[in-house]
Amino acid sequence: MSHPADALTELLPELSGPTATAARHILAFPEDVAVFSMRELARRMKVPPVTLVRLAQRLDFAGYDAFKRRYVEMVRQGGAGGVRGVAHSRNLDAARAVTAAAAQPAGTQGFVADVLAAEQELLRQVFAGLSATALEEAAGLLAEARRVFVIGRRTAFAPAFALAYALLKARPDVLLLQDVAGAPEAALEDAGEGDLLVVVTFAPFSRLALGLAKQAAAGGARILAIAEAPIAPLRKLAGRLVFVAPSRSIAFPESATGALAIANLLVALTVARLGEAATRRIAANERRIVASGEYLLAGPAPG
């Protein structure tokens, strides 16, 4: 049996209004069909429940129940949102969602509005999931740890780099782990009590990053995670210091907006906690950069 996404993609140009909205959502987030009830899914899509019934019938299913069963079966087989399915189809699902969103009648202006609205929704979800207690504990660790290691691979590299780069301006001994030489674990050989490893990871979650977290924790280091979901391995390693950064948006392959916001927030809290020590270090760092001629608006380059 063919994948419903193929039929949805082919049908989408013929759809309009709530039915098109529902189709675009399913193309972007196929696992939602298996996870949520029809009424809850319709609420999330902001369409009437009957829209889902009509869409299922347009796809030659007897009704919505049959349509849902097809997605449940795909999850069991790892084909749509299951443990294997996320890894196997996420990029394709994201590409379909972007293509579908761009094809709407409102044109480029409507597409831009939808993309930015989706990014704003990610930030709302980040804010809703934050704990002041966890943030304060995380800022304390980032400020006081002997050394701070940071790891983020693929899409998660951007927020990991942003956190490490900014934090190093405010305090010493911050290292972004990279595997240029094929041995990222080497930097953690001596990691232990008093050290902190920050892990940034999105679904389907980096096996290497989690492995490094286990290595660091085994040596006595603390773990702080910025992750798409508080999956069991991270909860076990980081406890309440798992900051959830949803990444499902109208973006390819996923959005790093939420993770970047959390990274920026953690650095800001850390700078505030470090106070005068951070201010002096930042001032010295800026003087060196200006003196190097890096900044166009800081005057002519030396020589």
Image: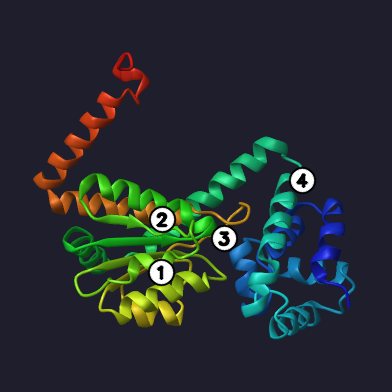
Tell me, yes or no, if residue 239 can be seen here. Answer: no
Residue at image mark 3: 248
Q: CA distance from mark 3 to mark 2?
A: 18 Å
State the CA–CA distance, disc 4 to disc 2: 33 Å
Q: Quadrant of the N terminus?
A: bottom right
Residue at the image position 82 percent from the left and 71 percent from the top: 3
Question: The disc labelled 1 sits on which kind of residue?
Answer: Glu
From mark 1 to mark 4, how far is it between C-alphas?
Answer: 45 Å
Would you name the residue on which mark 4 appears?
103
In front of the other: 285 or 29: 285
The Cα–Cα distance between marks 3 and 1, rounded to whole angstroms, is: 30 Å
Q: Is residue 290 visible?
A: yes
* Up-down relation of residue 275 to residue 149 (above or below): above
Residue 160: which numbered mark, if any? Answer: 2
Please report the residue visible at 69 percent of the width from the left and 36 percent of the height from the top.
Answer: 108
Nearer the observer, 284 or 66? 284
Q: Earlier in the sequence, mark 4 or mark 2?
A: 4
Q: Mark 3 or 1 closer to N-term?
A: 1
**Three-letter amino acid code at disc 2?**
Ala
Q: Residue furthest left?
A: 276
Q: Nearer the viewer, mark 3 or mark 2?
A: 2
